[in-house]
Amino acid sequence: MAEYSPMMQHYLDTKKDYKDSILFYRLGDFYEMFFDDAILASRELELTLTGKECGQEERAPMCGVPFHAAENYIARLISKGYKVAICEQMEDPKQAKGIVKREVIRVVTPGTVIESNLLDEKKNNYIMSVYKSGIYFGIAVCDVSTGDFRATQIKETNNFSAALDEISRYSPAEIVVNNLMYDTTEEIAKIRERFQIYLSKQEDNKFSNNVEELTSKYNVVDESENKIEINDKTLCICAINGLLTYILETQKTNLDHINKIILYNNTKYMCLDINARRNLELTEKLRDKSKKGTLLWVLDKTSTSMGGRRLRRWINDPLLDIEKINKRLNSVKELKDNPILRGDIADLLKKVYDIERLVGKISYGNANARDLISLKNSVKQLPELKK
């Protein structure tokens, strides 16, 4: 059997490390896909399937997209539940000696999307890790676009039901699980049946219980943002480390905007199971999953994307602590009773862009001049808002 051409051999070597992703392989002005990836992408994206000489008797199936329009094609694949690995040229082809050096610079997954045109501006895009140990669970959840990172552990009588309630609370786009969780087929089947979620399995060694490394890099706090001792929260630690490893391995960059991890107690919020959330139509309609006609739709008069996401979280997490409930009601009363103050704050907030996601884009290194100007104009409003 004839050998593959050097370029195709490099493609195949790269593909071995990203078997669960569609590999976008940069060739000149195009990202090309080959073999099974090409057949799949041509069907899902309605692209013309061609072939390429690869040193074999038969031409390799091939299809491609222009690199300047790749974002739209990637968005379509992500919305259909696929992962996309982006393999970029790392040197100028004119300067290269022999085959051009190429590397995967990022893996885009349903839970790690940061592009604003792929996201609902008033809804968090969460990725969750579920770490199963015996009959107990550790859960960590992160919105990579904003840096919001939370974790809890479940040690109750009905543990799996409580874990399902947490999944329902956040509605993540993707869940990363350890081997034991993945091999518990009955529980995985229930998750797949109830939620439209992309599931990724990660080896157990990625879910380490290393506390020192975690606390040296991240500020681990409780919900009141007080520093806490976490040595006894092994399930939380394993879930957090598993999720951080997955995010860093797929995004291949230091995400400095993820610097605070909030450990919360799921018993501090009203327990609403998936059926209660659906039937109450809190954030999406039962029939078509749209926002119009829901409680959130009625209440959402927020002036910023950040406010919209915060309101959604408050509706999804009804408080149980009377003191906190009264504090929130007093804040609402103060604004309700002072329409001039309310109007002034709303006017200032209308000039504030999505600071959380702008900071995320800057951390990724893909912010443009418009993003930086938006951040500058937003920060300008803060002294007046604070006053």
Image (cartoon, rainbow, N blue to C red):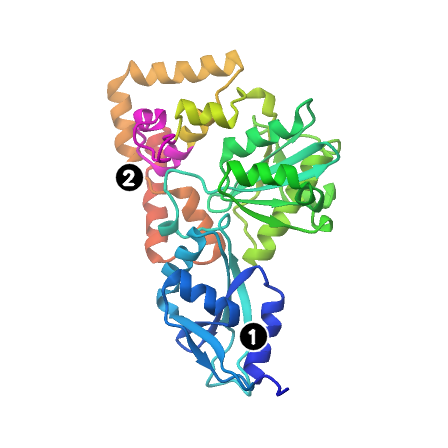
Residue at left 42%, top 51%?
79
Under tag 1, what secondary structure?
helix
Q: In this view, does 85 lie above or below 79?
A: below
Which mark is on residue 11? Answer: 1
**Residue 189: percent from the left, percent from the top?**
59, 40
Q: Position of residue 56 (x, y in %)?
A: 56, 85
Callout 1 crowding tier (Cα within 10 Å): few <14, some 14–19, many ≥20: some
Q: Nearer the viewer, residue 42 or 168?
A: 42
Label 2: which secondary element:
loop
Q: Residue 176 versus residue 257: which sits nearer the camera? A: 176
> What is the magenta range?
284-309
- For label 2, the crowd category at 10 Å Cα-Cα, with few meaning under 14, some 14 to 19 and many 20 or more, is some
Q: Is residue 286 magenta?
A: yes
Q: Name which residue type carries label 2.
A: Lys
Q: Which residue is drawn at 50% across and 16% down?
A: 324
Which residue has dot 2 on it? 351
257 vs 329: above or below = below
